[in-house]
Amino acid sequence: MAVNITSIKASSNGVWEGDNPLDYAFPLLILQTTLILVLSRLLAFLFKPLRQPKVIAEIVGGIILGPSAFGRNQVYMHRVFPKWSSPILESVASIGLLFFLFLVGLELDLNSIRRTGKRAFVIAAAGISMPFILGIGIAYVFRKAVDGADKVGYIQYVVFMGVALSITAFPVLARILAELKLLTTRVGETAMAAAAFNDVAAWILLALAIALAGNGGDGPHKSPLISIWVLLSGVAFVAFMMVAIKPAMNWVARRCSPEQDTVDEAYICLTLGGVLVAGFVTDFIGIHAIFGAFVFGLTIPKGGDFAEKLIERIEDFVTGLLLPLYFASSGLKTDVAKIKGGKAWGLLVLVITTACTGKIVGTFTVAMMCMIPARESITLGVLMNTKGLVELIVLNIGKEKKVLNDEAFAILVLMALFTTFITTPTVMAIYKPARGFSARVDRRLQSASDTTKDELRVLACVHGPGSIPSLINLIESTRSTNKASKLKLYIMHLVELTERSSSIIMVQRLRKNGFPFINRLRRSGFHDRVAVTFEAYGQLGQVNVTPTTAVSPLPTMHEDICHVAEDKSVTMIILPFHKQWRRFNDHEEVENVGHGWRGVNQRVLKEAPCSVAVLLDRGYGGGAQMTPGPTSTAVQKVCVMFFGGPDDREALELGGRMAEHPAVNVTVITFVQKNEMDDLDLVLRPSPNKCRESNYTFTTAITNPQNEKEHDLTTVAELKTRWEGMVEFVEKTGSNIIEQVVAIAKSGEYDLIVVGKGRCPSTMVASLAERHAEHPELGPIGDVLASSGQGIASSVLVIQQHDMAHSEELPVSKITREEADNKKDVEPSHLV
């Protein structure tokens, strides 16, 4: 039944008035949007184990909702996706596409592309030209085999087909590389640089294709002069934007710089309005509205506060709500049923084979000529074969301009889906850089102290600005003033890779060398403060400082940290605790940065190739930074609590290093069991069924308590000899160690308390094994000191010594020795 689009009303009067909401534009749009979002999110969840980009789920969701699957039911199709609703859905989706292309232009730094090496440019040129040449042959076959294809001019068909086959999707490729942790390998760097070149070339070719297309096969034959006028107008538009608008946007960005404190809302609104105006102008010219939005995005200064504010305002709404509608509308227009018979399916196989061959062979050949190893060259070819956003834009415009009919459109959409889908599994199969941690050598402070010739290498991680002063104070206090003992400091800024595309904007700006991003950080916002602060510390204290950045999803962030620690032969990793305490007058505030960051710490503690320290910051140093160098006055008071065991010995070693610094006073408090007969009556028994989230874990290794005690006594005696007169020793005896520990921490006498995690505990620590744990990753004593509401003022450093013998941990139960002797099946994890 034909529907007059002018008779469609926006909203209904409701079911009580007898109206069906699905006969009205706005309620139907809400239903369509909800269906698309729910299905695409569900598919994204299902595809996540396969590491597929979100665009795959959105296109497949559209295909399922469209005529290929659900749409075979005509009642559903006429009710949920009637033909009269298509222009409305596509108009809303196009607004999202317009602003998304503005974001793409905003994120694409032309200066960084110009600075990229010739090798990436040559690889990109080969990756474009060879598929484009093969596309000429494909266009010829299509015109012969697909009904109605020969009605379109050959030049228009060749250009659209060539562009469709030669495009590499830059945003999708960046996401795949990030998921596979290849962003900062040589393959990832080259692929990103080549894809950036490819992206620019794709937009030029797309503008050319649109200018040549006109109305496709419909209407009267147009004069070739029209295409020339369209191209000239497009060139004039780009020139005007770069000459006139770009300086104006630079002025706006300066007005919105951090020095101005606030970003004027008028400038934000003016810029967003400029996106719409630029889109209207290019549509008026005859290219496409998205081209104007993209070029306008290029005029915005990169990396400043203004660009970040723009992204912050529109990204989530555009990429989370509107853009999925565009991808889904592509799927809705894809009718797989149009691919009928062996000939049509043969065309699909031919297109996929040609696209893959052109990209992979072309890239592989040139990469080999550039002296890139064969395995990396073939990986580059597979990565450059990624399709996505621009591919779908080309196909949709081709269908809109009547250059591609339903059958050709469906074949090319399936080609884009297939080539993108196989990228991740293929790359995982043929290329995976060595990331194994060779933890054969125990790297810890005790072994490092045996030779003063070797420099101490520390990897300090930071993910928020609040912990920087305390982190610098901690690092400075561990630095010996002995010139023979050097400090090599790696600062790693941890950046969470989320589904937001802006979380990998820095990919283009942080690519240099090393893993991951061993380089100078980009000069804006928090990244700038991290780099400047630590570089200034390095210059003042004559410390070798190397800033680094890791961009990863939180579940795999620990791999990056451990890899750098292994690669750089680090002795100790310092991690910020996921909570920060701030005291205001008489009350205490706790800032929790999220459970995800706590998981990062837990996984690093489990898999680190060296010793690990977790810093619970309560304002170590009072928020002021210690003055580097030997002329500092003694201002920091540090307490090392020693109960016994490998972790406590590592804490003791760190305390000794701190004592060498003239600005640090160190006190070692050793806790002694009141009744030594209790030592013989306690056994810890593994209880693997206990929950690790609320129970402490201890080593499963069988240890000899007497040997451990002797080792403890020897370590303390050596420390007294080595740092005589520099360290104050206090001995405490008692039964209730929690009260004693809390009392020391509440006294406010110490700025920092250093404790061991206690995986191989003494009797006193073992007695706390069944205590309910709030932060089990810190061990019993660390957890007591991390508890809120007790008035503890001191910052806390919890240390875990690297020892492969104690790498396996389990929750335990306390039993007496008599019970252990009566149970033949009991193999105690630790005899105390």
Image: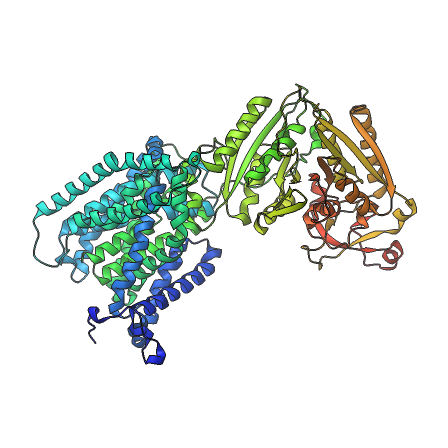
Residue 339 in the image: state x and y as whole percent: 26, 64
Q: Taking 823 as reference, is 294 left or right?
A: left
Above or below, 224 against 529 in this view is below
Q: At which x and y percent is residue 588?
A: 66, 46
Across and down, in percent, residue 541 comes to 60, 23
Instruction: Work out whether residue 799 or residue 453 is closer to the camera in this orientation and state it.
Output: 799
Is residue 136 something that shows in the picture?
no
On screen, 750 above or below 99? above
Residue, x 17% and y 47% (percent of image)? 285
Q: Tell me if residue 89 can be seen.
A: yes
196 vs 600, left or right, is left
* Quadrant of residue 189 within the rendered picture: top left
Given residues 566 and 727, the one toward you in this image is 727
613 lies above or below 42: above
Check the picture and name the quadrant holding the N terminus. bottom left
Colouring scheme, one of rainbow, by chain, secondary structure, one colour:
rainbow
Res 120 → quadrant: top left
**Quarter occupied by residue 437:** top right
239 and 306: which is toward the camera = 306
Residue reaching furthest to the front:
585
Say if 154 sits above or below 446 in the image: below
Relative to residue 733, is residue 237 drawn left or right? left
The residue closer to the viewer here, 716 or 35, is 35
Residue 811 at x, y percent in the picture: 73, 54
Q: Count the marks.
A: 0
